[in-house]
Image: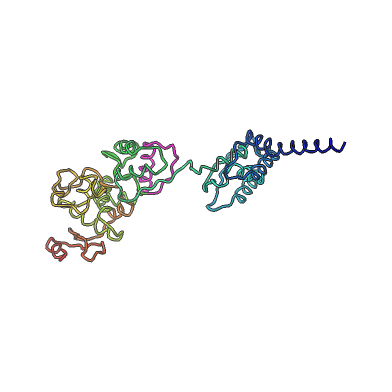
Amino acid sequence: MRRLIIPVFLLISLACLFLTIIYIPIQATRIYGAPTPALGIFQRIQYSALLLWYDGLLTRPLDSNGTEQSFTIETGESVISIANHLQIVGLIRDAESFRAYLVYSGLDTTIQSGDYKLSAAMSAIDVARELQDATPEEVTFVILPGWRIEEIAASLSTSGLSITPEEFILAAQHPPGGFDFLSGAITTEGFLYPDSYILPRGTSADQMIDAFVRNFGLRLSSDVKNAVDRQGLTVYQAVTIASLVEREAVQDEEKPLIASVFLNRFKIGMKLDSDPTVQYALGYDPVAQTWWRNPLSLVDLQFNSPYNTYIYAGLPPAPIANPSLSALHAVAFPADTLYYFFRAKCDGSRSHEFAETFEEHLENSCP
């Protein structure tokens, strides 16, 4: 009789061993997918058993009618903290089961910090997978003061938006309607207000242009418009001069002085002689990989373009860049001077010497 008991015991032990080593992992794989190869055999068995034990805590949503809510994972936040936080805010049923699934699947090592939109109508497994991609529904897009349209377009490739540079440039060449200050404009250049924008990822090129131009309109206060009018300028002319000021000035405090030079020249019909207008006309320099070639040669200064203010008197046909509000204010409220000339100082400070006469201007030349 004892001889029979031993084989039965062995059979039961073998059956339990089979259940533990083979059946439980197979069942867990069928329901939850394959475990991460990083788990050892005993860990695989352990976490497979845990998942089968937890079962509905992972596969059933906490609230099938749950609404979407924001959830943030901080940089360096632990898996335990994330799981507890999800349970506290009512997005998952149980933090421990959630963490077990993350370890089993290997998703615990690939969670990304960032902002998410999650819902209690999602199962814990769905939540875990969602946390692998922190790609936001909105992106931040920045325009720097003094950028021209092509420079804005070039930054689109790393923006997270689906707009191509070509689509943007094409849209920027057609000013949107509904903005009085764009009346007669041949391009949106100058009115794509430098700022930081939060845009939906699905924003179109036209919508993007509209947002930039609309922001410019919001910054164009009645005080500025009245001041521009007192200068005898239209807003379009003021923005055109401001674009020159933006490209010429390095220090903000000099912008009203530089604006006074251009305004003084413009009012007496003198050529503006502004290097940035030539740079704009020349376009992209593939050697220096810049849109603003510097220094300019004597041959460059003779480049035949209506934008070249060394050849043609008056303002260029359109702004040459998108100026900051400080540059526009400098044109609206310029320094009261008799300056007609300025040039960079010789001390490397990147500030300028100003002069009333050409003789004084020559005296300011570097040795």
**Residue at 31%, 45% in the rendered image:** 151
Q: In which quarter of the image is the C terminus?
A: bottom left
Tell me which corner region of the image, top left, top right, bottom left or bottom right, holds residue 27: top right
Does the segment drawn in magenta span residue 202? Answer: yes
Residue 236 % position (x, y): 27, 45
* Prevalent SS, magenta region: helix
> Left or right of 224: which side holds 278?
left
Q: Residue furthest front?
A: 3
Residue 100 % position (x, y): 64, 44
Q: Residue furthest right?
A: 1
Q: Work out whether residue 107 or residue 341 is closer to the camera in this orientation and state it.
A: 107
Residue 108 % position (x, y): 58, 46
**Residue at 71%, 36% in the rendered image:** 18
Q: Work out whether residue 246 or residue 97 is closer to the camera in this orientation and state it.
A: 97
Q: Work out whether residue 354 or residue 38 is closer to the camera in this orientation and state it.
A: 38
Q: In this view, does 143 lie above or below 64?
A: below
**Residue at 17%, 62% in the rendered image:** 355
Q: Work out whether residue 354 or residue 71 is closer to the camera in this orientation and state it.
A: 71
Which residues are the magenta region? 195-219
Q: In this view, does 26 lie above or below 100?
A: above
Residue 205 % position (x, y): 37, 37
Q: In which quarter of the image is the N terminus?
A: top right
Q: Which residue lies furthest to the left in this view?
A: 359
